[in-house]
Amino acid sequence: MAGAHVRVDNRLVHGQVTVAWTRHLGVRRLLVCNDDVAADDVQRMLLPQAARGLPTDVLTVAGTLDAAAGTGIMIIVKHPQDVFRLVEGGLRPEVVNVGNVAPRPGTEYTMVTRSVAVTADEADAYRKLAAAGIPLVTQLLPRDKPAEFVPLLDRKGL
């Protein structure tokens, strides 16, 4: 199962995604993938509204695997562990864009870029993805040059 663009962004659906990325990639459908978010009635109602008319589903990892066939799909995950579970389930993204990951209160994290905070557990998940042959980049906006993500983890000692 390949073809979908995957972005790690713990803000999920917001302007950078709904305007810049969807236009740049020709996205026709968003899949928000995270088990906890999918179980939250409020988020399941609000996130599609934030997508500005773009068809949007808020799904579990298993639900995302069932829905991810086809073209023009962008999968937005909250955590790298979500991506790893998708890959374990058979999804083969061409690239995973670590877009924007704000620090979570109460966690120990390292700022890998000005917009990406990484905990030790997340660093492990990113490295497992890389070991599985999944290319990882960080790119905030389409106009920005993508940067290889694993060397940034290396530089920060993660």
Image (cartoon, rainbow, N blue to C red):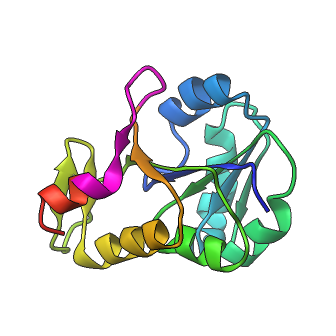
Q: Is 98 positioned to the left or the right of 3 in the image?
A: left
| Residue displayed at 60% across by 60% down | 43
Residues 92 and 44: in front is 92
Q: Is residue 21 found inside the magenta-colored segment of the image?
A: no
Viewer can see residue 26: yes
Query: Which quadrant, please, contains the N terminus?
Result: bottom right
Query: Which quadrant, please, contains the C terminus?
Result: bottom left
Span of residues in magenta: 141-151
Residue 119 drawn at (x, y percent):
24, 71
Residue 82 drawn at (x, y percent):
54, 71
Viewer can see residue 101: no
| Residue displayed at 79% across by 35% down | 28
Q: Is residue 71 above or below residue 23?
A: below
Q: Is 130 positioned to the left or the right of 117 in the image?
A: right
Label count reads: 0
Q: Is 144 positioned to the left or the right of 92 in the image?
A: left
Residues 133 and 100: in front is 133
Q: Is residue 145 found inside the magenta-colored segment of the image?
A: yes
